[in-house]
Amino acid sequence: MTQPTGIGGRPLTPAVGVATPELRIARLRGHALRLVWSALVLIGVAGVAGYFFDNLPAGMENWMLLAAAAVVVLLLVVLPYAVWWSRSYTLTTQRIIERRGLVRVQRRELTHVRGYAVHLRRGLIQRIWGAGTLTLSDGVDDPMKLVNIPNVDLVHETLVDQVEVNQILAHRDAAASMSNPPSPSR
């Protein structure tokens, strides 16, 4: 039996009963648009600190200015960036994995074979930037939210395709195993 040729860059269909390798399709983070305010704060703090350095009113020291600038940068720039960086989504050919957390990392998986509903929600700003929020619900566990994902239409289409392909392969393998039961051993 020959393998079918791939169409449009899709991988070849595996033979019946053969385990398919898990391949990474994409690793995603939320849209970096949420970091715009942090960038503006960083520019503003640098400008204010540069203007007032060695030009402070009596009773104030330069180290006080630098300490205040460091606290503002830590709270309004570094912390939001670390929170943004700590949440990632990995889409593979068999599942989607959510990782979040800085100190205590939480990991959650949802397999494509089980199937799930994909709900897309987009606000006005998200539409302008091509982002959106995807909610994946399998009806059993809590829904998985992929918040503020860039290129959300492409990710949505990919998730739907992966669920369809995995369910077709699972049904095909199940039907093949039912039609060819193992022979009893003597």
Image: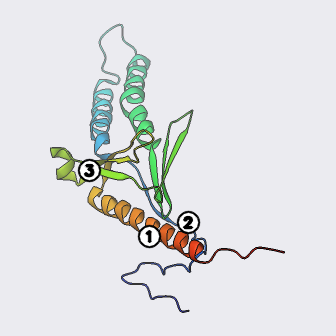
Q: Position of residue 37 (x, y in %)?
A: 27, 36
What's under tag 1, amino acid-wise? Ile
Q: Earlier in the sequence, mark 1 or mark 2?
A: 2
Question: Mark 2 to mark 3: distance in Å?
Answer: 26 Å
User: Where 107 falls versus 172 (above or below)?
Assistant: above
Residue occupied by mark 3:
120
Q: Position of residue 143 (x, y in %)?
A: 39, 41
Mark 2: secondary structure: loop
Q: Earlier in the sequence, mark 2 or mark 3?
A: 2
Dividing the picture into quarters, in which one does residue 123 lie? top left
Mark 1: secondary structure: helix
Which of the pair 131/71 is nearer the observer?
A: 131
Q: Position of residue 180 (x, y in %)?
A: 61, 78
Which of the pair 105/45 is nearer the observer?
A: 105
Question: Mark 3 to mark 1: distance in Å?
Answer: 24 Å
Residue drawn at point x = 28 percent, y = 41 percent: 36
Residue occupied by mark 1:
168
Which of the pair 69/144 is nearer the observer?
A: 144
Q: Position of residue 32 (x, y in %)?
A: 33, 47
What's under tag 3, amino acid-wise? Leu
Q: Earlier in the sequence, mark 3 or mark 1?
A: 3
